[in-house]
Structures are given as structure tokens and as C-alpha cells.
Image (cartoon, rainbow, N blue to C red):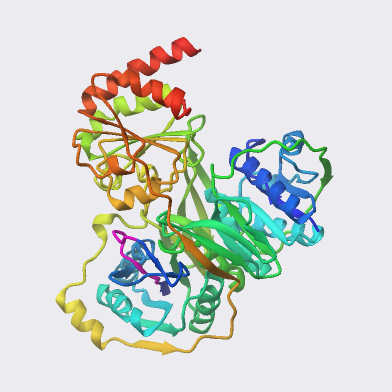
Amino acid sequence: MSILVYTESEQGKFKKHALEAASYAYAVAQQLGTTVTAISFNNEENDVLGTYGVSKVLQVSDDNLKTFNAKAYAQAVSQAASKEDARVIVLSSSTDSKYMAGLLAGMLKASYAPNVVAAPESTDPLVVKRTAFSNKGFALTKLEADTSIIGVSNNAFGLKENPTDATVEAFTPELKDGAFGVKSVEVDKVVGKATIADAEIVVSAGRGMKGPENWGMIEELADVLGAATACSKPVSDLGWRPHGEHVGQTGKPVASNLYIAIGISGAIQHLAGVSASKTKVVINNDPEAPFFKAADYGIVGDAFEVVPKLIEKLKEFKAQNA
Amino acid sequence: MKILVCISNVPDTTSKINFTEGDTKFDTSGIQFVINPNDEFGLTRAMWFKEKQGATVHVASVGEASTEPTIRKALAIGADEAIRVDATPTDGFFVARQLADIVKKGEYDLVIAGRESIDYNGGMVPGIMAALLDMNFVNTCINLEVDGNNATAIREIDGGKEKVSTSLPLIIGGQKGLVEESDLRIPNMRGIMMARQKKLNVVDPVDATAATEEVRFEKPAPKGEVKLVDADNVGELVELLHNEAKVI
């Protein structure tokens, strides 16, 4: 048996979270005394997988699978798991991986733990630590079925290099009727801009910005930092910013290295959604804002004065460190 | 069109989370339970299908008798009938098995579940159901239109959205966007009165075992004191982020 990892890619490049999943799979393989097999779709960058500890790559090359299709991909991964006799399957916490994971758990009658933040606490039985209650707590989850699926939380276990020679094998899954029962019609995606899911830095703003017309400085700050932009729930409810930017308990979760909250008071639902971020900075003119209790660094001040100064200082910093 | 909306009974979003019995159980004392927000967006969209396209809407939930107020609220919002599977929802796999059985017996055309529940965050119930029933499945669904047997959906993806076409029978994992926050309905007195007359069928669970078990819970480590930087000295923040936090 080996550990199977699904390595997600986009336009022929592996996503960072896919390589984190591979790093995690290697750690599990070490604990269990086995090796890692990866399954990749329409991707030739096999050396990259070797760097993160993958010994064998099952390479699927199929034009019908150029666009992600959850059911077809799940069938392929499930067939790869039986071919490799894999009892542990590792994947990331991206939107697509989570979409596929439920289907895969149903197909394989497998145990599935999402949002896992650390290498298994034990392997017999298999127990993993994951976030629960929307980041207000952690659960130690025992995976009891014959096959286990571990969804690794983004930016928690981290990238770990374990240089390995990866052998490559072409793999042709047998896609069953109905695999394409859901067809992609159109993908509307910003290309070349950091997304909340995989950004190292997220710049987020709330109602303190007073109106959508004032978001120019938020976007400029994000540009300087190479960050993704996000917003609080009231801002998306008011229609100032698109829903896709809403972060918090009912929006997207954030697990970036740096999260900068501007004009966001810090309701418990918001704090839950962003608490997995490693360093949190808050800028707010109300010293009593609850966010100050959850942040690492804070500035009490008017965002309209502080943010332009911060942009200026960051530009100076970048010029010096370029 | 026959719609089943799957409801999870979860702590209100403002709840403080504590654990009890040696950190092995979620402490429910003082907790107010609500319809899982992701499910409520789906329920509200189902109401739209009922009013504009004459759909029948049932709700189903797996839980003990104590969850009935949450189910009654779904009836007060406008669902026609409810089913409660009388069992402790031990894990996502167990719940999906129960709901799949209801979908099969009830011959539903459209099943609306939430993307995930805000308590255990499993996010697996609709996907497992879709695999068990071999139905089409769209997750993180933010828009859904049904025309006869055909459906068009928009799903949220990392960094954007994707439009997909599919057909009934269909399961979706819904979230905000299916309807707006302002479209959510607070039950009125008439709805609450009518909900009392509606059928709430209690059924026994089918034989199924859980695939996971929560052995222990932990709370996040307490946060240290915030380091405040003077608004006139923003450069210090840049310095701290670079030298101390090492994030830029």
C-alpha cells in the first residue's frame, strides 16, 4: 500500500496547497513506513512533486479533464486508490478538493476529515487534529473506515521539501456514464491576482470605509503587498463588494500568513473565520473594537489617514529591499 | 418539482464554544440553536421555487426531539412538511446515509443542503449523498435556476465563479448567494401558527455506522496582548511585520 495524494493544478502548474498536501502525505508515509503516490491531471511538472516527497506519479492526460469536474475526478482518484491499494488519501482544502472529497468519501465508503492542521496524532487508530466550530475550536478525529481521506488545511502544515526520485506512469481512468452529468459552461476567474484561498497576505476592509468609492486605497495597499482583497459581511450584504470577498464564519475562511483588517470591528463571526491567519493587524479608530483583543498588532487611528501612510512606508520598504 | 431541504441544527453564530466531560463533548448549556446559515439560504431559495414554480418543499433533519424547534422554524418559514430522523447525528457519513434513504423513498427531484454546517464543518453530507444515490451534484452553489428537467447553476470557485449546466435529479451544497441576506425570512405569527398544523414525521434511522469519531476537543491557545503602534509612526508597523513577525 502507499499514500495517495491528489495534486491539484491549474494551467499546468501545481497549486501551492497541492504541494502542501504532498508534504503532508510524505509525513504520513514516514509514520506508516510506506511511500507517496500522486495523481495529477494534465500536468507534466513531475519533478516538482519529487521535491516534496512523491515517489510515483500517476499522470492522467485527458482533454476531457482539462476543466475540473468533481465527479469524473473523484472516479479517477478512487480508481487510482484501488490500483495502489491506498488506505489513506490526502488532498487540500481548496474549493475544488472539498467538492471532490465528499463524492470520494461516498464512493469509497471512506472516513473523511477536512481542515486538518497537523500530522496524525496517532496512526493506529488514525487520529488527526482539525479545526471545528468555524475555527472556534479543534477536534481530534478518529478515522475508522478501511479507507481514510485527509483534507489538509491550507497554510497550516506548510511546504516541506523531501527530495525523492519520482517515477512517472501514465494512468487512464475508466470514466463511467454520468461522470459528466454536470458540465462546465463558463469560468469567470480573475487571472494573475492572488485569491483569498491561496494568498500569503490578505487585506480586508469593513464598514469603517464608509462607502465602496473609498476602496481605492484598500486595493492599492493590496497591490503593494501582492495581497488578496477581502471584506466583512456587512460590506458584502450592502453590495459594496462582491460576495466572493466576504470572509468570516458564513463566508470564506482565511488562513494567510498576514491578515490586515481595516475598519472592521471584529464581530465573533468574523474573528472565527480569520483566526487561522498567523499574524493579524487591525487598524480601527475605535480603541474598544473587539478586534484589538484578537490581533497581534494594532493601530488606533483613522483609516483614511493611516492607510495612505502605510502604503507610502511599504513602498519605501520595498524600494530598500528590492 | 419535489424539493427536499436538508437542515442542520447548529449553535447560533454568536455562540461562544466550550467543551465539557473532559473535553469530549460540545457544551450546549446556554447555547441557542438555529437553522445552519448555509441551509437557510437554500431553504429560502426553495421558497422561491415553491412560489414561482409550484414546487413542493419538504425539510429533513437528523437529530433528537430537542431539535424540533429548529425544524418548526423551517415549517414557519414556509416548508410544507418535515421529516425528523430520530437519531443522534454522529458524523457526516451517518447523516448522509439517513438523508439518502429519505431522498430515495421520497423520490425528490432536487435536494438542497448547505455547503457545510457551521459546527463540525464536515462539508461532506451533500457529496456523500450524491455518491450514494448517483445523483448530479453541484457544491458551493450561489445561483440555481431550474427549467423543466434542466438546471443551470453557478458555483463559487477559488478566485471567481463557474457556470455549470446539469439536470434533475440534482443535489446542491448551497451557501449565501443562492439568495441575498436581505431575502431571508423571519417567520411571522401566521407562519408560526400554521407550522403547528403541518406534518412533522418522525422516522427511525436506517442501519448505518459512523465513519469517524470525535475523540477530543481543544480550544485555541489564548491570544497574547496586542502590540499597539502609534498612528503617527506607521513605519514602526512595517518594521515589526518585517523583523518580528517576518511576514513581509
Q: Residue shown at 29%/43% (left/top)?
A: A293
Looking at the image, residue B194 sits to the left or right of residue A182; the answer is left
| Numbered range of the magenta stretch | B7-16
Residue B208, x across and y down, in percent = 59, 81
Q: Is residue A136 left or right of residue A288?
A: right
Which of the pair B144/A241 is nearer the observer?
A241
Residue A2: quarter of image: bottom right
Please state, as top left, top right, bottom left or bottom right, where the N terminus of chain B lies in the image.
Answer: bottom left
Residue A162 % position (x, y): 74, 38
Q: Is A152 included in the stretch rendered in magenta?
A: no
User: For residue A33, which quarter of the picture?
Assistant: bottom right
Residue closest to the eye, B227 or A108 = B227
Q: Is residue B150 visible?
A: no
At x 43%, y 67%, the residue is: B112
Q: B182 or B145: which is nearer to us?
A: B182
Tell how many labels: 0
x 37%, y 70%: residue: B27
Q: Magenta span: helix, strand or loop, mainly?
A: loop
Question: At which x and y percent is residue A49?
Answer: 73, 39
* Residue at the image point whose x is 45% and y is 23% from the top: B242
Residue A222 screen position, x and y as percent: 39, 27
Is residue A241 positioned above or below A89 on the image?
A: above
